[in-house]
Image: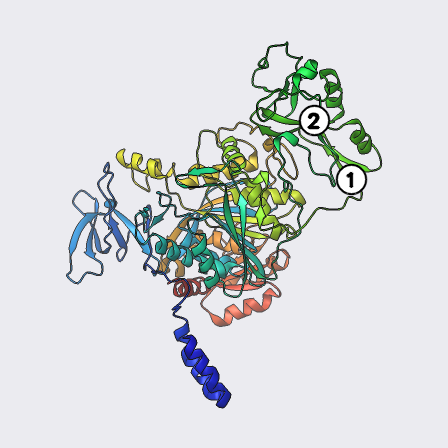
Amino acid sequence: MSRLSDLIHTVKQFDPQLGVDLEREVAPLQERLPFGLNFEKHQPEAVELPGVSVRVGSKVRILPERGEDTPTDRRLWVVQDIQRDSSGKRRASLVLARSREPETIEVAVDELVLVAEFRDSIYPGLRSTGSVGEGGDKPFHTVINGENFHVLEALTYTHRGGVDAIYIDPPYNTGARDWKYNNDYVEGDDLYRHSKWLAFMERRLKIAKELLNPDQSVLIVSIDEKEYLRLGLLLEQVFPGERIQMVSTVINPKGVSRVDAFRRSDEYLFFVMRGSAAPARLEFASDVAVDVEDETPPTGGDPDWTSMMRRGSSSARADRPGLFYPIYVDPETRQIAEIGSALPAGEHDAPTRGSLVPVLPLRRNGSEGRWQIGPDELAIRLQQGRVRTGRPTAYGYVINYLPDGAWADVQSEKFQITGTAPDGSVLATRVGAVSRAQVPFTQWRNPSHNASEYGSTLLASFLPDRKFPFPKSLYAVEDALRLFIGDNPEAIVIDFFAGSGTTAHAVMRLNRRDNGRRQSILVTNNEVAADEERALRRQGYRPGDAEWEAQGICDYITKPRIQAAITGRTPAGNPIGGSYRFGEQFPIADGFAENAEFFTLTYESVWRVSQHRAFGALAPLLWLRAGATGRRISDLPNGWDVAESYGVLRDLDMTSEFLDAMTATPSARLGYIITDDDRRYQMVCDGLGDVTPIRLYSSYLQDFKINNGIAS
């Protein structure tokens, strides 16, 4: 192709029009990508939909017997007829799909599961499964339980071109049982493992592109070394011409050992910046890695906190035995609760004080040091707010304090005291301090991004006794998003590999910073982990059974975590201990002034939609498109209704009343009109003024016909 391009260039010098004509004919050949990233498309991808009704014409699979830990028969069947037998049980007549020789079978409908192939048109709806409201009139965060490809298609109806940021943490394709393709786990010995992953990702990224605002938005993708090279090429192909950068970020400072390989301590973030999007100048709350033995926070806007551990000369226990004493920290609040007496000579362990954590002046190598000041002086400074509890270490917590000179500065005109931290220490900002804000480097080594401490451990405090593999650090996701939407308090963020729900949690933290109204849309399925799946199958359960679904990621982890974050209480109703760190520090039990609603994706028929029999399922989509704020219109008993952000008109004889109500509701931005009459539809539009009119159900049905064309 490169040689052909050279020849066309030569032709254009002698006959410009002929050159243009040749370029036009050659262009389709260049679309075939004979170079770059090539992979099998693995069409069609399909998903099983347990719990969705089986109808005549449905594509289905036959389930294995209950109690058997065997894979489902992968063959597709088409339902030809459904009849009731003499006992009243529904039985389906099936014919094998795409078979040269017809094969038929009769099976009980209860033994079938509906299958949707990604070449099929789907008409989605949503069913509410709960909500939590602590945010007044703020927009709702949304969690949707469903196949993310189909949910993304649904979101093209509600948010096409309107999303400011997408953050995803997709399957890393490690070769373990960490993800499924066509409902089968992709094993490490699968020869098509990488191309299946690429096909899986490409379909979703193409729809994600439709959702992102082309003028200013960002896609953030987290990945590790297994697929980062292929992902980089895939992003170049899906987002040609956009600015793409990769950042290396340390998520485990201790590293993870690998057989015959380097210890892994980092992973990667790809940033796809669309339009004018660019990283902001930020002062990361933890952008300097501080050594455990020299915990002196960086200078700048903060006071000059100094480590309580003595350094340099005369710093051993033997030099000042009276300064080797325990300081007791409450692990829930990180407040210093007690100050002990100096330990007698020869004693090396502090007496226990219930659940309090004793902190002794021990160096990293285990040798015994001493504190800077004695117990009595420490008690005085503690009352003054001059003592701060730092990060946890193997020996308890780092203890910092303000020496006399630094304390005098804080009390002078050099500083402005802004409040008190949860541990009782003073919060102060240097007046006229030069900001350390800058565009971050492409290598991040932030202590707050530690996925063990601020991912797994933090999640365990919200959901005791529930486990989720490898959650992201809350503060890492917050920092990544803050770079692009920190100055946009109305931003919309989507995560379609939602996992434990960290993205929504991070958006709530951003809202608290500036009283923002950002909203997140989280998408996850309700799959159970591989081990739980085997156990449940042996117990006779299947997907769709209540016992199975209760263990699924959405119902067991994602939704409870979002609810716990907002309320500040665990699923058992207990206040969550501890405080948030980095940036604003406040008790976790305070929760957030936010709203969230939980939905499950439904699959509607064209006939039910067009006959206004599926309005209850489409109603949440209309509400989402109008901004997910205020009351949701769920039915139309009077033929019309108007809520805070939108209105719906079904009975056109009530147009006058509807238009009056819309005029009286200036916050209403959309007007849905249900009609097939072009003339009357236009009359309603003329009366809506600046309100955007949307025609139902033709816009909905047409949208998903178009989507199907894109996705396939």
Q: Is residue 147 left or right of residue 380?
A: left
Q: Is residue 64 left or right of residue 218?
A: left
Mark 1 or mark 2, which has the lower sequence index? 2
Q: What kind of element bears circle 2? A: loop
Name the residue furthest front: 313
Q: Which residue is mark 1?
A: 430
Within the image, what quadrant is residue 55 found in?
bottom left
Vertical placement of residue 557 versus 481, above or below:
above
Q: What kind of element bears circle 1? A: strand
Identify the image quadrant of the N terminus: bottom left
**x, y percent for residue 285:** 65, 41
Vertical placement of residue 653 versus 379, above or below:
below
Q: 316 and 176: which one is in front? A: 316
Vertical placement of residue 591 versus 322, above or below:
below
**Label 2 is placed on what type of residue?**
Gly
**x, y percent for residue 101:** 15, 61
Disc sitting over residue 312 in the figure: 2
**x, y percent for residue 571:** 49, 31
What residue sits 59% from the left and 41% below the top?
Answer: 446
Q: Are marks 1 and 2 in contact (CB under 8 Å)?
A: no
Within the image, what quadrant is residue 398 found in?
top right
Q: 565 and 231: which one is in front? A: 231
**x, y percent for residue 377:** 75, 18
The answer to whether any part of residue 14 appears in the image is: yes
Identify the image quadrant of the C terminus: bottom left
**Label 1 is placed on what type of residue?**
Arg
Q: Looking at the image, how many numbered discs can be counted on the residues?
A: 2
